[in-house]
Amino acid sequence: MELIRRLDSNSAHDCVVTIGGFDGIHLGHHALIERLCAHGTRLGLPTMLVSFEPLPREYLQPADPPPRLTNFRERWRLLSSTGLERLCVLTFSERLRTLTGLQFMQLLQAAHARIVVVGHDFRFGMGGEASAQWCAERGSQFGFEVDVISPVPIDGLRVSSGQVRDAVRVGDFAHARRLLGRPYGMRGRVRCGNRLGRTLGFPTANVAVKRRRVPLSGVFAVRAHGAGLSAWPGVANLGTRPMVGGTHMLLEVHLFDFSGDLYGRELEVEFVARLRDEASFASMDAMVQQMHRDAAQARRQLGER
């Protein structure tokens, strides 16, 4: 998959395009991508997904941005497996925010779009004037067809990034899996920490979450993938670590009965069950006692001896 940064720099050849935030890459997103790829195959044209960094709501609500299900690297990895040929990432800025609907359509025209695939709830342009229906009525003026995709229902509800956020926030990972079509997890490179966990008998792999806000926090039963591991059981804390004066979010994963070296390697942490909120303790001894209880509970949740 090719990464490009300008909507008009994908060469002078025609293409088929879809547009959106695509946070989480859930089954509704997959429906858009599958329709896009079908158009590309039928017409013999390359496929391109247009998205944004930061996501529009992160730019519009800087003091209270929505939690991110996937950071940029996670989105790239998930989209790379869909058959897409190009990912165009536009910097969402004041210039992009103030485009009118017609100016946005002109951008798509400049990108040589032949078909534009959007979800039923798509909106763009200043004030959100360019809805899916608005675009469909005007696409022919700019030389392309607009294909509007119906919502995808799961358990009687429309699949959306908001639904996934709600599910993982309360620890309903089974429902999140139905919405995503895969388990929910976070992926990142293991970095060096202060090695406090090792001195307490709980060595951890520390993974930076790389997003302004996370959709969940607390202590979890998890399984780790990647770096030579396959569904390796463990317990994880996702939070700011108040007992050691932490100020930023960090994912700390203790893998049961593991003694290898993971520093510098990418690890994917699948969330299986929520155990409790992150907490402060009266002493380090009290914290270690709770860590033992967490580990025992996580083993039970994971079916580990």
Image (cartoon, helix red, strand yellow):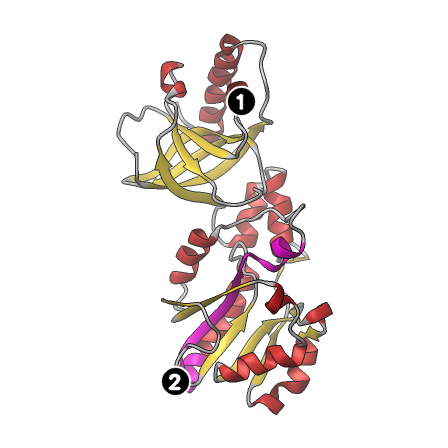
Q: Is residue 83 left or right of residue 259?
A: right
Q: Where is residue 201, by image quadrant?
A: top left
Q: Position of residue 214 (x, y in %)?
A: 56, 42
Q: Report the magenta residues as a range.
A: 40-60
Q: Position of residue 1 (x, y in %)?
A: 36, 66
* On screen, residue 152 above or below 134: above
* On screen, residue 88 above or below 227: below
Three-letter amino acid code of the residue under disc 1: Gly
Q: Position of residue 176 (x, y in %)?
A: 56, 47
> What residue does disc 2 label?
44
**Residue at 73% across / 68% down in the picture?**
127
> What residue does disc 1 label?
245
Image quarter where the C terminus lies is top left
Three-letter amino acid code of the residue under disc 2: Gly
Dot placed on the residue nearer the N-terminal end, 1 or 2: 2
Q: Where is residue 158, by image quadrant?
A: bottom right
**Residue at 44% across / 68% down in the picture?**
5
Q: Position of residue 39 (x, y in %)?
A: 47, 80
Q: Is residue 261 left or right of residue 256?
A: left
